[in-house]
């Protein structure tokens, strides 16, 4: 069965960077794109961007342009999301999801605190 | 920026029908997807492409579309259906996926 397994929780200081991984199994990795979605405590879902696992093309949410980078490693079927210049309002659970949303990772809590 | 509008909350008694709406100008041109999210869990897709149901999702979940509004209907609501529900679609512009989420609707089973 399809599984997306994400890396563990992170605690970062303001201004630092975080890189979250999402390891896929149970399907042909390069046949589907991966979206990243985050959810701040008590808030709704926010789409962060998308990456094609086939050719690496990306599309980022406008509000995160310049701070986020999404990449993939096809040799390990793993997608990565790096967010830089972290602020307190980046504190959230970060999810990866396989297009078009059938399968999601378990979520990674990123806490930004001084 | 493009927005999808959902009611913040819907309440129904067990066995009744719950309807959750989602409105957006691009919905006539873009498919809608519905997710169920329970506390502390990742979202689960319950409807895709407006009205298709993934395998494993109970038949009481259905979706429909009319103009700029899509509706998630849960017939014969059960206590286990209490959750947050999010609609998701795409901005009609651009070549690559560009997801947009509604604000979410909290379904309370009385």
Image (cartoon, coloured by chain):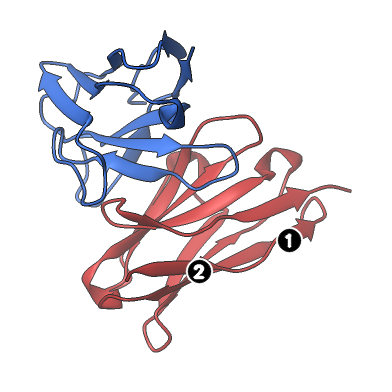
Chain colours: A red, B blue
Residue at point 12% right, 22% down? B65
Relative depth, front residue between A29 and A80: A29
* Quarter of the view holding residue A71: bottom left
Chain holding disc 1 = A
Question: How would you rate the neighbour count of disc 1 (Cα within 10 Å): few for under 14, some for 14-19, many for 20 or more?
Answer: some
Chain holding disc 2 = A
Outermost residue on the front side: it is B15
**Disc sitting over residue A5 in the figure:** 2
Judged from the image, the secondary structure of the residue bearing numbered disc 1 is strand
Q: Position of residue B27 (x, y in %)?
A: 17, 25
Q: Is residue A97 left or right of residue A8?
A: left
- B21 shown above or below B30: above
| Contact between labelled residues 2 and 1, with CB atoms less than 8 Å apart | no
Residue that label 1 marks:
A10
Q: Earlier in the sequence, mark 1 or mark 2?
A: 2
Work out how far the residue at label 1 is from the one at label 2, CA to CA, in angstroms.
15 Å
Quadrant for the N terminus of chain A, please.
bottom left
Q: Position of residue B102 (x, y in %)?
A: 38, 26
Judged from the image, the secondary structure of the residue bearing numbered disc 2 is strand
Residue at point 48% right, 17% down? B108
Q: Is residue B82 visible?
A: yes
Q: Position of residue B74 (x, y in %)?
A: 27, 23
- A6 shown above or below B19: below
Question: How would you rate the neighbour count of disc 2 (Cα within 10 Å): few for under 14, some for 14-19, many for 20 or more?
Answer: some
Relative depth, front residue between B62 and A95: B62
Nearer the observer, disc 1 or disc 2? 2
Discs 1, 2: same chain: yes
* Quarter of the view holding residue B19: top left
Residue at point 40% right, 36% down? B36
């Amino acid at each position: 069965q399809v599984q997306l397994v994400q890396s563990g929780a992170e605690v970062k200081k303001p201004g630092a960077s975080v890189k979250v991984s999402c390891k896929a199994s149970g399907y042909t990795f390069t046949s589907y794109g991966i979206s990243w979605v985050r959810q701040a405590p008590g808030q709704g879902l926010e789409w962060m961007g998308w990456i094609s696992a086939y050719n690496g093309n990306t599309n980022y949410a406008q509000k995160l342009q310049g701070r986020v980078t999404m990449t993939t490693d096809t040799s390990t079927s793993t997608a990565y999301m790096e967010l830089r210049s972290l602020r307190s309002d980046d504190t959230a659970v970060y999810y990866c999801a396989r297009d078009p949303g059938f399968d999601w990772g378990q979520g990674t809590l990123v806490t930004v605190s001084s | 920026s493009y927005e999808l509008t959902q009611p913040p909350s819907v309440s129904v008694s067990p066995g009744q029908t719950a309807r959750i709406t989602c409105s957006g100008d691009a919905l006539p041109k873009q498919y809608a997807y519905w997710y169920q999210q329970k506390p502390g869990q990742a979202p689960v897709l319950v409807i895709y492409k407006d009205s298709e149901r993934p395998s494993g999702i109970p038949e009481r979940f259905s979706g429909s579309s009319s103009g700029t509004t899509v509706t998630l209907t849960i017939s014969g609501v059960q206590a286990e259906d209490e959750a947050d529900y999010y609609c998701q679609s795409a901005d009609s512009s651009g070549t690559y996926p560009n997801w947009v989420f509604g604000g979410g609707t909290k379904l309370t089973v009385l």
